[in-house]
Amino acid sequence: MQQPTIHRGQLFWASCLALLVTSLSFGIRAGLLDTWKYEFGLSQEDASIITSTAFWGFPLAVIIGGMLVDIMGMKRLLIFAFLFHAAGIILTITAGGFTALFISTLLIGLGNGTVEAACNPLVASIYTDNKTTKLNHFHLWFPGGIVLGTLIVFFLGQKIPETQFLSNWKLLVGLMLIPTVIYGIMFFRLHFPVTERVASGISTGEMYRSLLNPLFLIMIVLMFGTAITELFTGQWIDVLLKSVTDNAILILTISTGVMVIGRGLAEPVVHRLSPSGVLVLSALLSSVGLYMLGHSTGNMIYVGALIFGLGVCYFWPTMLGFVAENLPKTGAVGLNLMGGAGMFAVAVYMLFMGKFYDNIVASKLPAGADIGAYSAPTATKEMADALAAAKTAAGPEVINATLIIPIILTGAFLFLYFYMRGRKKPDKLTPVSA
């Protein structure tokens, strides 16, 4: 019986579109947090709960999906991703308050995680000879979509008179339906290979035993830090620095724009430095960039955003590529546990830092002040000025608290680099025929 033709180029581009929807949900929604707080009367803690929902919906989907991908097949998982994304976008558009935004964000998070659960092993399986580079090329669509999303909010968002809040936010969210429908149609029509692990004859039992490898467990812990450094800062940048600069959302655009270019040029960088060497440099630059974001004013903030973007550029795909190349027997489950661990860490960190941020702001206000009253449209000019000053002080404090993470990562990755130099490289698994 003739085997169906696997069009790996089309599969790759459909995967990129699916990831584009994931990143648009970050970019557009990051620019709408204050609008939702204004329109629905949400506190920063409420907004943090809504935002973090996508981050724990993601690990839920990516871990369960990682366990099911070899049973269900990557195609069925990606059809589920399409349904989750479409339902989440539509529910966001029709939302009337906290509950609907919470559920819609959860659905989008499940869609994002399902995309990651299927597409990471798909890319690793169709490009077995160049995993880290192609995972970087695939993941450039994450910052690429954030750039596009923030630019959509910045240029197409219609502000309510005398405020910074957007009246046409539902239209902006609805734009995400376009790539969602396109990738859904493409995946429905295409044939898929089995994962590399299945094709190479590695048993399910051996795959799960490989997850106990000490090196894999260490990479899981390090993934906590790399994900928080990149995604927490990116998702919260508009909140943390809005009072410091009038164009806080453009800081996210600059840092993610650098990430797009860097991931597109990943091949010579990865081959020159090795995955572990890239991770050392990434952690070091992230530390410098985050320090500058928390301690700079004026145009130097944009320099800090540039350095920070260079730092976090290779974190996520190179962590996945490192596992795919050096621990290939962990299979799709290993890759998806990495992604799930990263997003879970971000979700927990966001919940903690949302409360931490509100407490800092409250401590900067007069004793006994109610943040809700100071944030309300009826607040006096004196109250509004006091709140703005409190937020100006609180944002950098949150950034400085986060700075310790990439500093620790720099030392950890330096140790990993020297360890890998003295370690024998594992044999490659049998390639999947394309």
Image (spheres, rainbow, N blue to C red):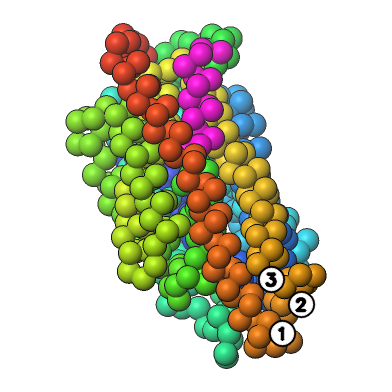
**Residue located at (56% from left, 54% from top):** 398
Question: Marks 3 and 2, how far apart in space?
Answer: 12 Å
Of residues 288 and 121, the one nearer the viewer is: 288
Q: Which residue is mark 2?
A: 373
Please tell me whether residue 330 belongs to the stretch shown in magenta.
Answer: no
Q: Which residue is mark 3?
A: 365
The reply to whether the C-beta atoms of the residues labelled 1 and 3 are less than 8 Å apart is no
**Residue located at (33% from left, 44% from top):** 285
Of residues 271 and 384, the one nearer the viewer is: 384
Q: Element at badge 3?
A: loop
Q: Which residue is mark 1?
A: 379
Q: Is residue 363 above or below residue 379?
A: above
Please tell me whether residue 223 belongs to the stretch shown in magenta.
Answer: yes
User: Mark 3 or 2 closer to N-term?
Assistant: 3
The reply to whether the C-beta atoms of the residues labelled 3 and 2 are less than 8 Å apart is no
**Residue located at (40% from left, 48% from top):** 16
Q: Is residue 348 above or below residue 51?
A: above
The residue at the far front in this view is 367
Q: Amino acid at mark 3?
A: Leu
Residue 6, picture quadrant: top left
Of residues 303 and 258, the one nearer the viewer is: 303
In this rendering, the label closer to the viewer, 3 or 2: 3
Residue 56 picture location, percent across and down: 65, 43
User: Mark 1 or 2 closer to N-term?
Assistant: 2
Residue 190 picture location, percent across and down: 44, 41
Judge left or right: residue 11 versus residue 370. Answer: left
**Residue located at (29% from left, 29% from top):** 277
User: Mark 1 or 3 closer to N-term?
Assistant: 3
Q: Badge 1: few (under 14), some or many (20 or more) residues near its Cα, within 10 Å?
A: some
Q: Amino acid at mark 1?
A: Ala
Q: Amino acid at mark 2?
A: Ala
Magenta span: 212-226
